Image (tube, rainbow, N blue to C red):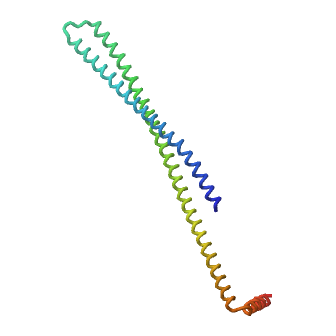
Amino acid sequence: MAADLRALKTLLWAKRRRLDGLSAQVQSETARRDAAAGAHQAALTHHEACLMDVAACTDRIDRMVRSPSLVPQDAVTMRHVKDGLEVLAAKAAEGVQAAAVQLAQAQEGLTAAVLALQRAEQQIEQLEDRRRRRLVEMDQEAEDTQDEESEEAAVARRLAQARSAAGPSALDDDREAAVAVAEQGA
């Protein structure tokens, strides 16, 4: 019985030690998720800036074309600039997608770490509950044993009082009764 309690105590100790590592993992995964969220936001901002540059370049080309002082060579140059800006915007869009994937992976890692921590905490609670129940059972068993011993002692006292009151002939009667019971059993 005491071995059960020692085993539960050792198991609880091991689970609690594991809890520290799981808590650290949750913190690490939270930091990773926060960093991925920051990178995703930065990628979105960069992509929006690239799109705004493309739009500004398109507006400038439109103004150049409408201008009476149009220099065709400048319009061609601006067209090449716009093409370069569109390539940058496309790369920025790829960066947004990559950052979104990293953010999703980081969120999955955080979710897994939180679930592992919750599962470990639940196991600890169950073990503590089991240990408490076992302690209550042991206390009840000890009380039952003590009650039985008290009853036996009380019966022995009453029997001794009855024998002492009956005198020495009662002892002979008890011996004769015990011998008779033994002979009948044989």
Residue furthest out toward the left: 68
**Left or right side of 144 for 50:** left
x%, y% of residue 61? 26, 14
Q: Which residue is pictured at 69% across the width and 92% down the height?
A: 166
Residue in the foreground of this view, choosing between 115 and 13 = 13
Q: Which residue is pictured at 52% across the width and 49% down the height?
A: 120
Q: How many marks?
A: 0
Quadrant of the drawing holding the C terminus: bottom right
x%, y% of residue 86? 35, 20
Residue in the foreground of this view, choosing between 122 and 7 = 7
Q: In the rendered image of this protein, does residue 112 appear above or below residue 147?
A: above
Q: Quadrant of residue 133?
A: bottom right
Q: Quadrant of residue 107?
A: top left
**Left or right side of 40 for 130:** right
Residue in the foreground of this view, choosing between 50 and 39 = 39
Q: Which residue is pictured at 24% across the width and 15% down the height?
A: 62
Residue in the foreground of this view, choosing between 39 and 92 = 39
Quadrant of the drawing holding the N terminus: bottom right
Q: In the rendered image of this protein, does residue 164 appear above or below residue 71?
A: below
x%, y% of residue 185? 78, 88
Q: Quadrant of residue 47?
A: top left
